[in-house]
Amino acid sequence: MATVNVESDLRIILWIQAIRAFLYGFGAVILGSVLAASGASALEVGLVGAAILAGMALAAIVVGIVGDRSGRRRTYGALLVILGVGGLGVYQTASGSSSSSRSSARCRPTRTTTARSRRSSRP
C-alpha cells in the first residue's frame, strides 16, 4: 500500500486557495472600478458583484458534489481543460483571429457620453 503525504497535499491546496482568493478580490476591485468609471451606479456595481459571488458559491457546491462522486483530481483536471479551451476562445475572439470580415482598424470604440460626464458638463 502506497503512503500518501497528506501534509504536502494540504500545503498545495492551501496555497492554491490563497492565490485564488487574492485574485478574486483583485478582480472584484478592478471590475467595480471599471464599471463605476463607465457610468454604472453603485447599485449596479453591487448587483454585479453579488451575482458573481452567488455564481461562485453555486459553482463551489456543484464542483464539490461532482468531485465527491468522480474524484477531485479528475474533476479539477476537467475544469482546467474547460478553462483553457474557454481562454483560447476568448483570446481568438479578442485578437481578431476569428473569421470576421471586419478589420481591427475599423472596430475602434467610439467615445460615448456617460451619465457622470453629462452631469459634470451641466451648468
Image (spheres, helix red, strand yellow):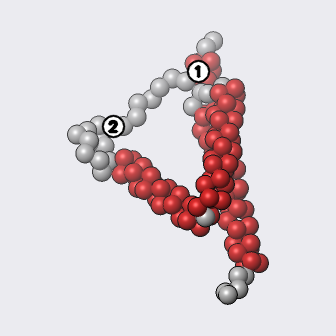
10 to the left or right of 82: right
The quarter in which the C terminus is drawn is top right
Q: Is residue 96 above or below residue 44?
A: below
Please give the count of numbered marks on the rendered protein. 2
Q: Is residue 114 above or below residue 32?
A: above
Outermost residue, top direction?
A: 123
**First-in-chain label (1 vs 2):** 2
Q: Residue at x 51, y 23 (%)?
A: 113
Amino acid tagged 1: Ala
Q: CA distance from mark 1 to mark 2?
A: 24 Å
Observer able to see residue 49: no
Q: Are marks 1 and 2 in contact (CB under 8 Å)?
A: no
Q: Residue at x 47, y 56 (%)?
A: 82
Residue occupied by mark 2? 107
Q: Is residue 100 above or below residue 77?
A: above
Amino acid tagged 2: Cys
Residue occupied by mark 1? 115
Image-quadrant location for residue 100: top left
Depth check: 7 or 90 in front?
Answer: 7
Image-quadrant location for residue 16: bottom right
- Residue 75: x and y in percent read 57, 61
- Residue 54: x and y in percent read 68, 39
Q: Secondary structure at mark 1?
A: helix
Observer able to see residue 88: yes
- Residue 7: x and y in percent read 77, 78
